Amino acid sequence: MTLPTPPELDSRRRRLIFRANHRGTHENDLLIGGFVIARIGAFTEPELDELEEILELPDVDLAEWLTGRQPIPAGQDTPMLRRIRDAGGK
């Protein structure tokens, strides 16, 4: 699958698109990748920092939180993670 990575995106944003779509589980690729592709161009630097932190989290935990099977723990509950969960990959 070829991902849309417009050339006008800087290398950090292109790298984040790749990481968001190559998580290791198809479920997270769809949930996180779809969200990132749709919004990456508009993210501010602090939002990119938040996204990078989320991409460091374990896939199993992210899948549980993003699908609502488990609540997001207080220590991981960030506005960006809630936005991804609420968007459902859209």
Image: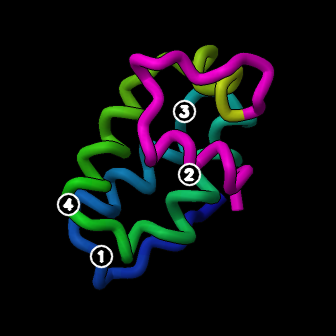
Q: Secondary structure at mark 4?
A: helix
Give the number of the disc on residue 53.
none
**Closer to us: mark 4 or mark 2?**
2
Local packing at callout 3 (Cα closer than 10 Å; few below 14, some 14-19, many 20+) is some
Give the number of the disc on residue 9.
1
Residue shown at 53% from the left, 16% from the top: 73
Local packing at callout 4 (Cα closer than 10 Å; few below 14, some 14-19, many 20+) is few
Query: How far apart in space, not on screen, are marks 2 and 3 (Cα)?
Result: 18 Å
**Structure colour scheme:** rainbow
Query: How far apart in space, not on screen, are marks 4 and 3 (Cα)?
Result: 22 Å
Q: Which residue is mark 4?
A: 45
Residue shown at 73% from the left, 50% from the top: 88
Q: Secondary structure at mark 3?
A: loop
Earlier in the chain: of badge 4 and badge 3, it is: 3
Q: Which residue is mark 2?
A: 83
Write down the region rendered in magenta. 67-90
Three-letter residue code for mark 2: Arg
Earlier in the chain: of badge 4 and badge 1, it is: 1
The front one of 54 and 28 is: 54
31 with respect to 56 (left or right):
right
Residue shown at 70% from the left, 20% from the top: 64
Three-letter residue code for mark 3: Arg
11 with respect to 62 (left or right):
left
Local packing at callout 2 (Cα closer than 10 Å; few below 14, some 14-19, many 20+) is few
Instruction: Provide residue 18's location: percent of width, then percent of height.
Output: 44, 51
